Image: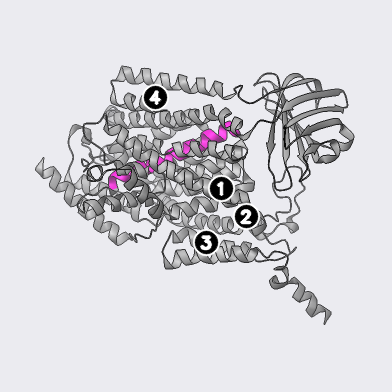
């Protein structure tokens, strides 16, 4: 973890070439971790099916299952796939509450979702479990293994899979969490770098911008003033004291108090600057 | 006489026997209202939410008055029957479809001053560090048995950003929207209670006494360019954050451009107030006892506390980590403001700093990670949304 967080930090502190290299490394790492996100930590079962449904034809040879707790009873989602980007098929089996041993009569409802990720085409078909599922067996409580066969117009779907434990699911998603952290750091680091060079961009655009737009001085060059400091403090106080959706605390800092804080900050800053 | 008895059967008192837990939720609603009025805890939010809880938990039987009685509005495969939809369900539409949060971000953008962030951009990293809490809680929620989209929606509570939490829940786990929204806003209201013990535990007195250098001057042109460049950068790298970050930067441009003062004023005053009323009230009304009082809600509240604590700790520790490399040291307390509870956590940092040194003014320094946290949590939400939708 520390390695990931140190990269954008060092990037912010180093020279331009090193920064660029480090940013490239972070983005590469993000992509790599994203790729790892579809990992093998989740147990995968076998599937044997040639599907022709809703005009989509596809072969699947792997499947995985997820068991979700819902208010009306557990829902078992069995996903069939061959490649991560190709067509996919999900069986959604809504199980009656309290059922541990699976069979077609144990289902409340049943639907099939087909999705073709290459053209984003998806369809959901609700079906009657008792007439469409030829066989289904498994235990949700102990072994958490599911085996079934679904026969519907033109296709025959046989599968066997294991429902992963919650710990396995959490471990499987660690790359996704790491990727998210890296992306947040990358974007905010890039924003920080952009802010760092913002005065230079302002200087570059100077000849093309109309005069009299705000005050200049770009304090990065050391031209800070008492007025600017007071303006900054007053700005902060305006935000802190505004009736925002998040304002109002037991500390009771109302707008008047914030104005006093702003005035005090401005005075302190002025003194500090005079001492420099 | 029959008419009178029929009337009695339709009263809330009669229906209370079917929904006794409504009484408990009504007590929760009254508690929220008391917190808002007596303790002044987040009154702008807790008062509408509290009253919404009262409205949502009046046992109205099968009269179809609640936020969930939508007559098939927006339901896939359902025919919408206008007469079957309640007024509350129309108002709730803005929550359910993530319309209100971007509007609130517009208002936040129009009232946010990025000056301190622009003058000290490295503080942006503290806003990023605090978002680690979101992803750790995401893993924790998976471990507790929630599905990945639900876990992501719960994790975002760690961002301490109510609108973002509502936005992501509406997109990924609408069935958990009520508990997540209530948890997010409750913890935001409790920032002054939750954060100080973590601050004291993770910092030494010497660290809390560090005075930071005053920020440099920031020109108006920098303030105008920042929302433009910032938006383009964020939107291209993390397009999922577009609805929230786009509105945030748009609102800020309205403010900083100085040529749209009327629009900026509307966004930061009238508009945000209207949306806050609708959002708070309908979120409160969505906490009907049958939907809200579940073990999942308890887990969500527990995970929310973890998320908030971890986010605060990560911000503090990252500030200490940065101090290893910096010549001009940061006061690590400002790391706690990386959670995006604007401006409450910045105020808490300021007050904790002043208890050690009354002449140490940390408010303006803490506002930098605070507003960076708003951007960071919106990006985190966008990333999770794009992966899990």
Asked if marks 3 and 2 fall on the same chain, the answer is yes
Q: How is the image coloured?
A: one colour
Whether A266 is among the magenta residues is: no
Q: Which mark is residue B48?
A: 3
Q: CA separation, marks 1 and 4?
A: 31 Å
Residue count near mark 4 (Cα–Cα under 10 Å), binned few <14, some 14–19, many ≥20? few
Q: Disc 1 sits on a residue from what chain?
A: B
- The part of the image, by quadrant, that contains residue A211 is top left
Q: Which mark is residue A3?
A: 4
Q: Which residues are magenta?
A: B364-389
Q: In which chain is the residue bearing label 3? A: B
**Front position in the image: A168 or B280:** A168
Which residue is found at the position 60% from the left and 62% from the top? B25
For marks 1 and 3, the one nearer the N-term is 3
Task: Give the labeled residue for mark 1.
Answer: B300
Between label 1 and label 3, give the one nearer the viewer.
Answer: 1
Which residue occupies the foreground of this view, A143 or A252? A143
Res B95 seen here:
no
* Mark 1 → mark 3, Cα distance in angstroms: 22 Å
Would you say residue A166 is visible in this rendering?
Answer: yes
Q: Secondary structure at mark 4?
A: helix
């Amino acid at each position: 973890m520390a390695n990931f967080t140190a990269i954008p930090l060092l990037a912010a502190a180093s020279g331009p070439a090193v920064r660029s290299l480090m940013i490239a490394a972070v983005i590469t790492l993000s992509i790599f971790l994203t790729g790892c996100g579809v990992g093998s930590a989740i147990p995968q079962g076998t599937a044997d099916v040639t599907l022709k449904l809703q005009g989509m034809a596809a072969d699947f040879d792997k499947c995985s299952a997820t068991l979700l707790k819902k208010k009306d009873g557990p829902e078992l989602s069995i996903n069939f796939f061959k490649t991560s980007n190709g067509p996919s098929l999900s069986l959604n089996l809504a199980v009656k509450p309290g059922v541990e041993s699976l069979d077609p009569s144990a289902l409340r409802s049943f639907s099939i979702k087909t999705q073709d990720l290459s053209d984003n085409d998806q369809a959901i078909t609700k079906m009657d479990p008792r007439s469409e599922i030829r066989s289904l067996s498994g235990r949700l409580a102990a072994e958490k293994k599911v085996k079934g066969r679904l026969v519907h117009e033109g296709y025959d779907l046989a599968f066997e899979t294991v429902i992963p434990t919650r710990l396995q699911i959490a471990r499987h998603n660690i790359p996704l969490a790491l990727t998210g952290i890296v992306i947040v750091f990358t974007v905010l680091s890039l924003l920080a770098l952009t802010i760092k060079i913002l005065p230079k961009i302002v200087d570059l655009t100077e000849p093309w911008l109309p005069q009299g737009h705000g005050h200049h001085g770009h304090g990065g060059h050391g031209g800070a003033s008492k007025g600017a400091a007071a303006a900054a403090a007053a700005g902060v106080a305006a935000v802190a004291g505004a009736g925002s959706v998040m304002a109002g605390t037991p500390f009771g800092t109302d707008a008047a108090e914030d104005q006093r804080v702003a005035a005090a900050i401005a005075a302190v800053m002025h003194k500090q600057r005079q001492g420099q | 006489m029959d008419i009178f008895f029929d009337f009695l059967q339709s009263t809330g008192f009669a229906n209370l026997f079917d929904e006794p837990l409504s009484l408990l939720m009504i007590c929760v609603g009254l508690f929220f209202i008391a917190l808002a009025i007596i303790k002044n805890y987040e009154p702008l939010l807790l008062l509408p939410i509290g009253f919404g809880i009262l409205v949502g938990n009046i046992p109205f039987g099968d009269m179809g008055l609640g936020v969930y009685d939508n007559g098939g509005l927006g339901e896939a495969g359902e025919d919408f029957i206008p007469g079957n939809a309640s007024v509350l369900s129309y108002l709730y539409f803005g929550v359910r479809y993530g319309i209100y949060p971007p509007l609130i971000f517009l208002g936040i953008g129009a009232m946010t001053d990025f000056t301190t962030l622009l003058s000290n951009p490295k503080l942006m990293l503290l806003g990023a560090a605090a978002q680690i809490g979101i992803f750790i809680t995401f893993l924790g929620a998976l471990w507790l048995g929630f599905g990945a989209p639900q876990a992501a929606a719960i994790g975002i509570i760690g961002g301490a950003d109510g609108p973002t939490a509502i936005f992501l829940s509406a997109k990924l786990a609408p069935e958990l929207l009520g508990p997540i929204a209530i948890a997010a806003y409750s913890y935001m209201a409790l920032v002054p209670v939750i954060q100080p013990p973590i601050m004291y535990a993770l910092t030494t007195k010497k660290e809390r006494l560090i005075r930071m250098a005053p920020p440099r001057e920031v020109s108006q042109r920098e303030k105008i360019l920042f929302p433009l460049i910032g938006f383009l950068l964020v939107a291209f790298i993390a397009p999922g954050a577009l609805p929230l970050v786009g509105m945030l930067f748009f609102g800020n441009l309205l403010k900083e451009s100085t040529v749209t003062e009327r629009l900026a004023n509307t966004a930061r005053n009238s508009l945000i107030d209207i949306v806050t009323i609708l959002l708070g009230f309908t979120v409160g009304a969505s906490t009907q006892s049958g939907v809200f009082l579940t073990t999942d809600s308890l887990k969500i509240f527990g995970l929310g506390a973890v998320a908030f604590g971890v986010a605060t700790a990560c911000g503090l520790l990252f500030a200490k980590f940065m101090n290893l490399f910096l010549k001009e040291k940061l006061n690590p307390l400002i790391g706690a403001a990386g959670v995006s509870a604007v401006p409450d956590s910045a105020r808490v940092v300021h007050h904790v700093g002043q208890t050690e040194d009354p002449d140490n003014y940390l408010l303006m320094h803490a506002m930098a990670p605070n507003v960076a946290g708003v951007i960071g949590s919106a990006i985190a939400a966008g990333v999770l949304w794009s992966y899990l939708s």
